[in-house]
Image (spheres, grey):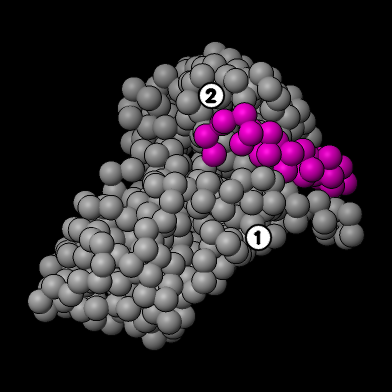
């Protein structure tokens, strides 16, 4: 397994990165290089001052009114009361808008993750790279300036991150995990439901069946560019033959992943529906529980004690549940439909209970671009408010809390001095109507304006 992972990296990633670059250059007029990561470009533009009618800064529990945000060389250098205009600065008048940090999705699959049976036998790294480049643009234009991508094949997520960081492709800042680590027959075992003689040598880099294999896989992932590790200690919904309520990874395997990842400076996200998988993963030190469907009061107490985040991903479950009820033939197997129907209401109730219990919540959608599309990510905020979160707490889950989970609070997630100038704005007041964040009219990433007055801006100037 491990020799194969190392051997495939140069061919697949170089090819995928080439296709991502081709995808960017083939798009419409706004498809120039992304200048938000280009230091020379940031240094060449004048200071920008944003006059914000209302500022929700991603950390404070109350907004500020009538403030000036001064941006220089891609970062926020000051947030001042009143409307000021430094000499030579370009003024962006958002005095009738609510200004916020760029939103952060902590659970995305930006290339679609080749989840279906058809995808597994028809999609290549090139296909996924092209899809990822398009989805990255949609995400950024909708106000998501950062994403934690938790599961892709072929190393395409690493290639896409590199292309965005180099300014070749327009998209959010990415923190990426490569393939999730799963036991044989677990949620991300790509051979689940397939005939035994249908196989692909590049499928097996994500299957681990001992602590030793887990350690080796974590080290390989880190070597090949992963920023975090995703594990599958429980079964899942969108897979065949596994049970979401059961723990499938052993405690020794989970511990081996966590200890190795943390020793390398990587955080660990645990896909966990069942209570045993949730509780054991929390005790063993994972940084976040994704989904958390069957958690209970004991689980919440453990999460508070260990400082573990919950990333609830409720909207995707609701949409899948609706499909299972109204068009079960669209589910790949009856097994999937049977699993999603009881879990969707549990996930909403779990979010409400976890929030009331004081568990830290970070925003995540489980968007793949199919059932839930990139550009729709902010719809999850309305679900969170419906579950009982205040609009302010839902916003902080998608800004300050999300940045803290990622481990980048010093760079993203707030409009404060020294942070990247990742800033969005909406008409109206999302503290009164959270759905206003589904219509972001202004997007800035790294001091570069991508959207203003709802109009996407050309980035041709990035060639400077």
Question: Looking at the rendering, which quadrant does residue 36 occupy?
Answer: bottom left
Instruction: Judge by depth and name the residue closer to the eye, 255 or 67.
Output: 67
Q: Residues within 10 Å of mark 2 (few under 14, many from 20)?
A: some
| Among numbered discs 2 and 1, the one appearing first in the sequence | 2
The magenta segment is 334-361
Q: Could you tell me how far apart the alpha carbons at marks 2 and 1 are, in whole angstroms?
A: 30 Å
Nearer to us in this view, 112 or 108: 108
Residue 126 in picture, x, y percent from top left:
49, 62
**Count of numbered badges drawn on the protein:** 2
Judging depth in this view, the residue of 71 and 130 nearest the camera is 71
Instruction: State which mark lies toward you, 2 or 1.
Output: 2
How packed is label 1: few (under 14 Cα within 10 Å), some, or many (20 or more)?
some
Give the residue at the far left of this rendering. 87
Q: Which residue is drawn at the image coordinates 56% and 68% (left, top)?
A: 436
* Residue at screen point 60% across, 64% down: 433
Residue assigned mark 1:
372
Q: Position of residue 298 (x, y in %)?
A: 66, 18
Q: Is residue 339 inside the magenta stretch?
A: yes
Residue 238 visible to the viewer: no
Tell me the element at label 2.
helix
- Residue 304: assigned label: 2
- SS assignment at label 1: loop
Residue 143 appearing in the image? yes
Residue 43 in percent (x, y) is at 13, 68
Q: Residue at x 46, y 80 (%)?
A: 454
Q: Are marks 2 and 1 in contact (CB under 8 Å)?
A: no
Magenta stretch secondary structure, dominant: helix
Decide if residue 168 is on the left or right side of residue 330. left
């Amino acid at each position: 397994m491990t020799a194969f992972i190392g051997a495939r990296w140069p061919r697949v990633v170089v090819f995928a990165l080439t296709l991502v670059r081709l995808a960017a250059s083939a798009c419409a007029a706004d498809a120039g290089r992304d200048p938000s990561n280009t230091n020379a470009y940031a240094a060449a533009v004048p200071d920008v001052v944003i006059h914000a009618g209302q500022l929700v800064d991603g950390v404070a529990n109350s907004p500020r009114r009538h403030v000036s945000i001064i941006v220089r060389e891609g970062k926020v250098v000051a947030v001042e009361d009143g409307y000021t205009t430094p000499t030579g600065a370009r003024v962006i008048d958002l005095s009738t808008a609510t200004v916020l940090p760029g939103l952060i999705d902590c659970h995305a699959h930006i290339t679609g993750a080749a989840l279906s049976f058809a995808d597994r036998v028809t999609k290549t790294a090139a296909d996924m790279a092209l899809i990822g480049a398009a989805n990255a643009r949609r995400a950024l234009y909708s106000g998501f300036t950062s994403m934690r991508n938790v599961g892709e094949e072929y190393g395409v997520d690493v290639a896409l991150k590199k292309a965005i960081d180099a300014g070749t492709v327009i998209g959010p800042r990415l923190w990426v995990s490569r393939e999730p680590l799963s036991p044989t027959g677990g949620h991300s075992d790509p051979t689940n439901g397939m005939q035994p003689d249908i196989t692909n040598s590049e499928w097996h880099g994500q299957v681990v069946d001992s602590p030793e294999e887990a350690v080796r896989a974590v080290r390989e992932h880190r070597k090949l560019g992963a920023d975090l590790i995703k594990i599958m200690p429980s079964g899942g919904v969108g897979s065949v033959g596994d049970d979401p309520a059961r723990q499938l990874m052993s405690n020794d395997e989970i511990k081996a992943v966590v200890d190795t990842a943390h020793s390398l400076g990587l955080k660990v996200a645990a896909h966990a529906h069942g209570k045993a998988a949730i509780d054991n993963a929390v005790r063993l030190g994972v940084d976040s529980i994704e989904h958390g469907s069957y958690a209970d009061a004991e689980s919440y107490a453990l999460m508070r004690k260990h400082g573990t985040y919950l990333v609830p991903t409720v909207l995707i479950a609701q949409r899948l549940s609706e499909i299972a009820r109204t068009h079960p033939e669209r589910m790949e197997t009856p097994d999937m439909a049977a699993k999603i129907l009881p879990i969707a209401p549990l996930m909403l109730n779990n979010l409400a209970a976890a929030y009331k219990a004081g568990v830290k919540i970070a925003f995540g959608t489980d968007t793949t671009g199919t059932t839930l599309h990139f550009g729709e990510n902010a719809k999850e905020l309305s679900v969170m408010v419906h579950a009982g979160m205040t609009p302010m707490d839902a916003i902080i889950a998608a800004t300050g809390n999300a940045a803290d989970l990622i481990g980048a609070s010093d760079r993203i997630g707030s409009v404060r001095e020294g942070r990247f100038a990742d800033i969005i704005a909406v008409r109206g007041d999302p503290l009164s109507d959270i759905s206003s964040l589904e219509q972001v009219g202004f997007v800035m990433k790294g001091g570069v304006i991508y959207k203003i007055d709802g109009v996407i801006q050309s980035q041709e100037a990035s060639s400077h």
